[in-house]
Amino acid sequence: MTCIFCDILDGKREGHLVYEDEDHVAFLDKYPIDDGHTLVIPKKHHETITDMNPDDVGKIFSLVPKIAKAVLRGAGADAFSLAQNNGKAAKQIIPHVHIHIIPRYNSKGVEWTKRQIPTDKMLSELAVKIRAALI
């Protein structure tokens, strides 16, 4: 089975990238829980976080504050939630390690919102704003 995230890394699928370094990328979720929902992934394919060595786990999580700050600024969010699921029973949909940065908005209340289906244009415009907010 083909990994959707590896296809994005290989350029076979479109991904709205907001961050990239030698070992990681971050891109907007195609079906976001809220505007600016971003996924941070390692470039090396690992199905679950327990498949990674501890140093690599530390490296990916050390990126979260930097990317989350850019998501907050670029998306105009008030707060964010983090999620990292491992295995089908944990509701991991794509079997490639990823960390969810899910923006939250005071105006939308505290209820968990349903996933959306934004247009590619909307995702592209938001990705530009988040990239510009990276410090």
Image (cartoon, rainbow, N blue to C red):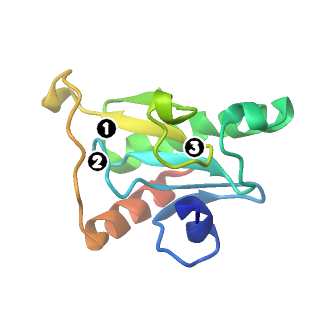
Q: Which mark is residue 77?
A: 1
Q: Earlier in the sequence, mark 1 or mark 3?
A: 1
Of the residues shown, which amino acid type is indicated by label 1?
Ala
Furthest residue to the top? 110
Q: Is residue 90 above or below residue 92?
A: above
Q: Which mark is residue 41?
A: none
Of the residues shown, which amino acid type is indicated by label 3?
His
User: In the figure, is residue 52 to the left or right of 14?
Assistant: right
Q: Residue at x 20, y 39 (%)?
A: 114
**Element at label 3:** loop
Q: Which residue is mark 3?
A: 98
Q: Nearer the viewer, mark 2 or mark 1?
A: 2
Q: Earlier in the sequence, mark 2 or mark 1?
A: 2
Q: Is residue 22 above or below residue 9?
A: above
Q: Nearer the viewer, mark 2 or mark 3?
A: 3
- Image quarter hosting the N terminus: bottom right
Q: Residues within 10 Å of mark 3 (few under 14, many from 20)?
A: many
Please identify the quarter of the rendering in which residue 129 is found.
bottom left
**Element at label 1:** loop
Q: CA distance from mark 2 to mark 3?
A: 18 Å
Q: Which residue is mark 2?
A: 35
User: In the figure, is residue 31 to the left or right of 28?
Assistant: left
Q: Residue at x 45, y 47 (%)?
A: 38
Q: Position of residue 54 (x, y in %)?
A: 83, 29
Q: CA distance from mark 1 to mark 3?
A: 21 Å
User: In the figure, is residue 125 to the left or right of 101?
Assistant: left
Q: Residue at x 59, y 40 (%)?
A: 66
**Element at label 2:** loop
Q: Position of residue 30 (x, y in %)?
A: 36, 58
Cβ–Cβ under 8 Å for marks 2 and 1: yes
Q: Position of residue 127 (x, y in %)?
A: 42, 61
